[in-house]
């Protein structure tokens, strides 16, 4: 399956509710129960964009107004407009949430996702819902993530060589730049992660903000 991550997608301008993007990655996506919980919990007060993976979106119909579902979504485009990211907390998605400054609600499914979800919560970039995953608990987690939205993470991006020579925009993130998978890995595992932790106050360093734009 080819996944189109950059298409120029934009949300409907007539709906100004906060947008929640829901994606469980590409491997552990056969979770219609999670998608239905997201719809029931969020559709009244949020716009919802669902990437359903192995679940046919037609099985979730009828969809409420403001909810769109497809097997794949242009993730980088959607994250540019998202207010909250409900994610499995895979390494790529975790790094991209930091890149775009979008707080996460983590629903880890397997492997490294549990550690990634814990790290996102530790640095103040996301939350995990109370168990079991119910409509009430998910809604509370999304509301909490939106309320505690972190300061824009791109304050630390210029510290990493991945952004060297890239144009800078006067926006919360550098919307013109698309990191490669190798660059996202470096941002998550290398200096970018350390700087993110410093920015969140997890690691104190007198030089953490030296030379960074305010």
Image (cartoon, grey):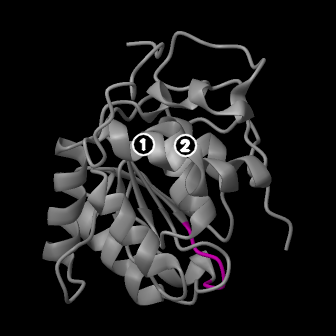
Residue 111 painted magenta: no
* Residue ID at (63%, 82%): 56
Residue 112 drawn at (x, y percent) = 53, 80
Residue 40 drawn at (x, y percent) = 27, 72
Residue 97 drawn at (x, y percent) = 49, 49
List the residue tagged with mark 2: 192
Q: Give the magenta range.
A: 51-55
Q: State the image quarter where residue 67 is shown.
A: bottom left
Mark 2 in CB contact with mark 1 (< 8 angstroms): yes
* Residue ID at (73%, 41%): 179
Q: From the viewer's perspective, is 17 left or right of 67?
A: left
Q: From the viewer's perspective, is 175 left or right of 181?
A: left
Above or below, comparing residue 120 to residue 138 in the picture: above
Q: Which mark is residue 165?
A: none
* Residue ID at (79%, 47%): 180
Q: From the viewer's perspective, is 101 left or right of 30?
A: left
Quadrant of the frame with the N terminus = bottom right
Q: Compute the Cα span from label 2 to label 1.
A: 6 Å
Above or below, comparing residue 159 to residue 195 in the picture: above
Residue 25 drawn at (x, y percent) = 61, 72
* Residue ID at (49%, 29%): 154
- Find numbered disc 2 in the image and state the secondary structure of the residue it sits on: helix
Crowd class of label 2 (few under 14; some 14 to 19; many from 20; radius 10 Å):
many
- Find numbered disc 1 in the image and state the secondary structure of the residue it sits on: helix
Farthest-out residue, right: 2
Crowd class of label 1 (few under 14; some 14 to 19; many from 20; radius 10 Å):
many
Farthest-out residue, front: 206
List the residue tagged with mark 1: 196
Q: State the image quarter where residue 44 is shown.
A: bottom left
Name the foreground residue: 2 vs 203: 203
């Amino acid at each position: 399956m080819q996944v189109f991550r950059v298409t120029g997608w934009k949300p409907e301008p007539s709906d100004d509710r906060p947008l929640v993007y829901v994606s469980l990655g590409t491997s552990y996506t056969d979770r219609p129960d999670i998608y239905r919980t997201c719809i029931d919990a969020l559709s009244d007060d949020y716009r919802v964009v669902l990437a359903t993976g192995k679940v046919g979106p037609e099985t979730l119909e009828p969809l409420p107004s403001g909810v769109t579902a497809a097997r794949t979504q242009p993730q980088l485009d959607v994250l540019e407009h998202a207010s909250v990211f409900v994610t499995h907390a895979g390494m790529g998605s975790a790094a991209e949430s930091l890149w775009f400054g979008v707080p996460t609600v983590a629903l880890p499914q397997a492997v490294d996702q549990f550690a990634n979800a814990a790290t996102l919560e530790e640095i103040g970039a996301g939350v995990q819902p109370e168990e079991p995953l119910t409509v009430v608990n998910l809604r509370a987690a999304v509301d909490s993530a939106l309320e505690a939205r972190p300061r824009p993470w791109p304050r630390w991006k210029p510290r990493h060589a991945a952004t060297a020579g890239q144009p800078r925009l006067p926006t919360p993130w550098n919307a013109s730049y698309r990191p490669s998978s190798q660059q996202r890995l470096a941002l998550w595992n290398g200096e970018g992660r350390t700087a993110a932790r410093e920015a969140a106050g997890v690691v104190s360093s007198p030089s953490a903000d030296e030379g960074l734009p305010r």
